[in-house]
Image (cartoon, grey):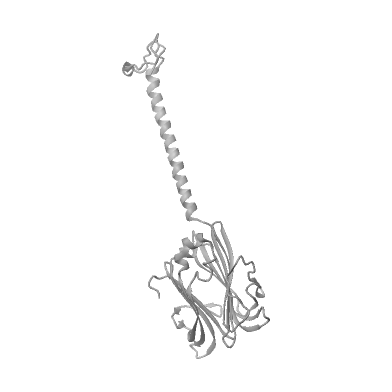
Amino acid sequence: MHFLPGNNKPTRDRSVQAIPHGIVLPGRKLCSVAYPLARYGEMQIRSKIGATLSDRWANFQRKRANSKSKVPFSLEKYYADMVTADGLYFIGYSARLRLGRIKLSYAATLYHPAMTSISSGPVLASHDMPIADDSGLTWSNPVLGFDGRWRPLTPAVKLVLHKTSKGLVEWICQQQAARVRLRTRSGKQYDGLGYAEFLNLTIPPWQLGLLNLFWGRFVSDTHSVVWIEWQGEHPFTKLICNGQSMADAQICDDTVKCDDFVLIFEHEATIRLGSLGETFISKIPAAIKDTRIEFLGGREQKFLSRGNLQFEDGSQSTGWVIHERVSWSKNSN
């Protein structure tokens, strides 16, 4: 497109295409050369702008997808228990959960029916978390009606059970064995042996690919045993006795075995049976229930048993066992 002499209106002249490069006709002002170059430059600019916009859109979509898949998550959970010499048991749970913008704390208990003046809960927005230091663990919760002191008999054990780029599962066995004194709101006092642990998760448990989980602990006056087994996408088995990791562990329904000993469960009694979410699912925000219902539907069976620990050298020790099985298998009963 150019201006012909004596004409103020732009006119398209097809003959321009045939003018050799370097020849300038009057009034054409190098348009024969400038026009193709301008068109070429325009195409390049449009191409670059299009690529830039396309890249920016792709990056935006990628960031948007990542923001949805990387919702901030953390779970800090305390577990502490005790069993008296005659089999009265107490189990306490306390946790802080963060899922995106949702934050909540809760506490709950599980206890022998003969223990009076204790509430099972759960209670939400509870700020009465256990306090752990070198001398042990102290936990007082007036709402649930108890005050307890756990004094360690064995050193703490700290392990990272699972770690990926998405987060980790850190397990601290604070007291594999402990002397415990528990008071209820009525003033009743209970003494026994117990156990305490702390879990720190920065990866949601429903992303661990668990099918079955086995956990338990045995405590006597002289020995302590704790075990964890995961079955699923990231299987592993861990068995610790008196603070020492044991090899070749086998976790069964009524025994725990390794090369050095066998722990036999006797007089087993079920103390809890139900889904993971039954204790507090009715009170948590719908945003969590709707998206995590499959995990919270995991079936938990918790038991209290008398334990008989038998070593290869013939020595024995008796105490109490608290253990559990949690299953997310579709065919579980």
Q: Where is residue 270 in the image (x, y as percent from the top left)?
A: 49, 81
Q: How many marks?
A: 0
| As drawn, 173 above or below 223 | above
Return the x and y of residue 273 as percentages of the image width and height: 48, 77
| Image-based side of 143 in relation to 288, left or right | right
Question: In front: 269, or 115?
Answer: 115
To which quarter of the image does residue 120 belong?
A: bottom right
**Residue 202 versus residue 259 in the image, above or below:** above
Q: Depth check: 57 or 246 in front?
A: 57
- Residue located at (50% from left, 71% from top): 278
Quadrant of residue 157 in the image?
A: bottom right
* Residue sitting farthest toward the top: 6
Farthest residue toward the bottom? Answer: 314
Visible residue check, residue 176: no
- Residue 55, x across and y down, in percent: 44, 42
- Position of 182 compared to 215: left or right? right
Q: Is residue 34 visible?
A: yes
Q: Where is residue 117 in the image (x, y as percent from the top left)?
A: 63, 79
Q: Is residue 117 above or below residue 318?
A: above
Quadrant of the image containing the C terminus: bottom left
**Residue at (39, 70) in percent of width and height:** 330
Residue at 45% across, 70% down = 298
- In which quadrant will I find the N terminus? top left
- Looking at the image, which residue sits at the far front? 282
